Amino acid sequence: MEKVSVRFDRKIGPMKPVHGVNNGPKTRMFSLDMSRYFRDAGIPYARLHDTEYPYGSGHFVDIPCVFPDFSADPADPGAYDFTLTDQYIEAIVAVGTQVFYRLGVSIEHARKKYEIFPPEDFAKWAQICIGIIRHYTEGWADGYRYPIEYWEIWNEPENPPMWQGTKEQYFDLYATAAQAIKARFPQLKVGGYAGCGFYALTRDNQSDFYKGFVSYFTDFLDFISASSGRIPLDFYSWHLYTTSVAEMAAHADYVRQTLDRFGFTGTESIINEWNYVHADPDRFKRMKKMEAAAFDAAVLCALQSGPVDMGNYYDAQPNMRYCGLFDYEEAKKPYYAFYAFNCLYRLQAQTETKCAEPGVYACAAANDSEAAVLVAMQKETSGKLLIDMAGFCSDEGVEAEFYMLDETFDLELVRSETFFSTQFKSVLDVTRDAVVLVKLRRASK
């Protein structure tokens, strides 16, 4: 029997927005609408990258889409084409999700490359970024006053389909843009560089290409540290595609430890691309299965308890292969892992959990009137799960609802109980890949 122990009276920190995603609720030229799913799951952040892929469909988010003529004047509102990006961001804001804006371009896998080269003029490129930020945060050019806080400079510059320049050129672009943006908007957060990941740290027989991702990170921090002028790095963003929760936790530890070692103790660590990715040809089908849902829930628990400040799953666009949450207008099993985590997130305070066996992951949260537990099971066989809960009581009793996500249930209510003691236990039958959500509230008089 697997056992999870929960102490609701032992608060260990705030719940974190690790259940964010990439891209917004209305996609494929607004023909696919996931708004109700975003709203119901309380998606905290939508990172804008590969939006309306490929090439931003010519009119979305990417710098060449928003500012199509690089010879134009960045101070001229008429030089920008904000129309479709405005509509896209409006849909994100409408569901209560915050925007995380990647300044740069989308990935290019085709033989001919178009927009992934270093800008002709780094200082001018930075001014274009400032124009975009002004439009969305200060109302410039018939714009908005959205509280968009996070602005990311480029994506995966160590990856040739994203950057055709040198490492040194990217470092210079980052320094130029980050300093200009921070000088103009000191209240905002600027960072990068959405690194590919650190696979060589945890996987054997990695090529020099993958080993280079590790040295790129430390070289980047060396560059910023050695600069005579202050180069801001409010957050460092990174990626990982894996089937291992332990690998996710190891990379999170490595990023935090490395940032701290270089003196960036106040820099946030943000994993803003991750997914359940197998090496086999069926990996995109498996992203939508129950095995992925159990993994996703386990990752959310691990990220919440680890040294990470934010997370963004890649991707929430139903027409993209990497979207495991939706199949066009239908929610798939993994979506419910995000919905379940949000039931904890809204309670604000994380509380203590302990798992006795490997393959079992848990997280809990509580406020004055409610509490919740999320348990993710990644086991080889079905079995029983004992949840031992304490530290949440009421003279009128505690009402508990048990929800199951497995091959049969889509996070559906399977049991209700009322407890009157200060400590209570419940045993459930669970399948090999399963997610359990327990919601508790103090009964009213």
Image (cartoon, rainbow, N blue to C red):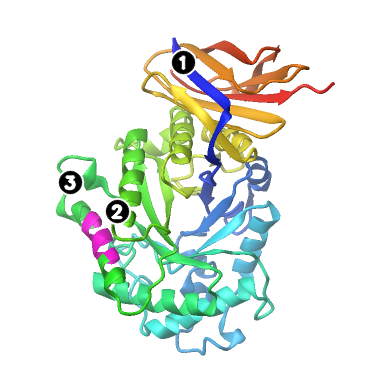
The mark lying in front, picked from 3 and 1, is 1
The disc labelled 3 sits on which kind of residue?
Answer: Gln
Q: Are marks 3 and 2 in contact (CB under 8 Å)?
A: no
Q: Which residues are magenta?
A: 213-221
- Residue at horizontal 58%, vertical 88%? 76
Point out which mark residue 443 bears: none
Q: Position of residue 251 (x, y in %)?
A: 32, 45
- Give the left or right position of residue 316, taking residue 272 as reference: right
Query: In the image, what residue occupies the spot 67% across and 12% down?
Result: 421
- Tell me where residue 168 sits by quadrant: bottom left
Image location of residue 314, percent across then percent down: 46, 48
Q: Is residue 247 above or below residue 358?
A: below
Disc 3 or disc 2, which is closer to the eye?
Answer: 2
Circle 1 residue? 3
Helix, strand or loop at disc 2? helix
Return the residue nearer the eye: 48 or 198. Answer: 198
Drawn side of residue 263 relative to residue 49, left or right? left
Q: CA distance from mark 3 to mark 2?
A: 21 Å
Decide if residue 282 is in sight here.
no
Sequence-first tag of 3 and 1: 1
Label 2 vs 1, first from the N-terminus: 1
Badge 2: how crowded within 10 Å, few (<14), some, or many (20+)?
some
Which element carries disc 3, helix, strand or loop? loop
Q: Which mark is residue 206?
A: 3
